[in-house]
Amino acid sequence: MKARKYSASGVPHADRCDRVSTLSAIGARLMGFDNAHPIREGSGPGGRRRVEYDHKHRGPEIRFYVYEDAAKLLADIWAEVEAIVARRSSRHGYS
């Protein structure tokens, strides 16, 4: 697991602008939580125009994340890590 804290101008609540990622052995990002850049919901003429900073990455997918507090964030990070380990273990026949 890799965590990084940095300050970013223009980002709401930059005091908690953290990026946490879990990387595979070859360096591919498996999971991450951050608020370092905005993400937009929807595309095209019918897409909604919601812009948020807090979000999570799971492989190539990006989803909005509702930040409540640091304790909840840590619990959510570890839940994602445990889910990744379980998925990868079952694929490789580990018990």
Image (tube, grey):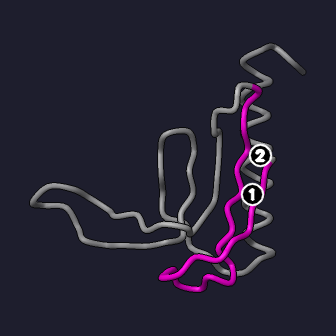
Which residue is the extreme one toward the right? Answer: 95
Q: Observer-nearest residue: 51 or 80?
A: 51
Residue lying at the far top of the rendered structure:
93
Tag 1 secondary structure: helix
Residue 69, given in percent of the width and then of the height, sits at: 72, 81
Q: Residue at x 48, y 64 (%)?
A: 64
Residue corresponding to mark 1: 77
For mark 1, does the 10 Å Cα neighbourhood hold few (<14), some (14 to 19), or many (20 or more) residues? some
Circles 1 and 2 in contact, beta carbons < 8 Å: yes
Q: Which residues are magenta?
A: 2-25
Asked which quadrant contains residue 90, the reply is top right
Pointer 2 residue: 81
Q: Using the image, determine if residue 49 lies above or below residue 77.
A: below
- For residue 8: magenta? yes
- Residue at 81% in and 47% down: 1
- The type of residue carrying mark 1 is Ile
Residue 63 in percent (x, y) is at 48, 56
Displayed quadrant of residue 52: bottom left
Number of dots carrying numbers? 2
Which mark is drawn over residue 25?
none
Q: Which residue is farthest left?
A: 45
- Res 25 → quadrant: top right
Q: Is residue 63 magenta?
A: no
Name the image quarter holding the C terminus. top right
Give the residue at x 80% y 24%. Answer: 89
Give the left or right position of residue 25, taking residue 40 as reference. right
Which amino acid type is marked by label 2?
Val
In the displayed structure, 25 sits above or below 29; it is above
Q: CA distance from mark 1 to mark 2?
A: 6 Å
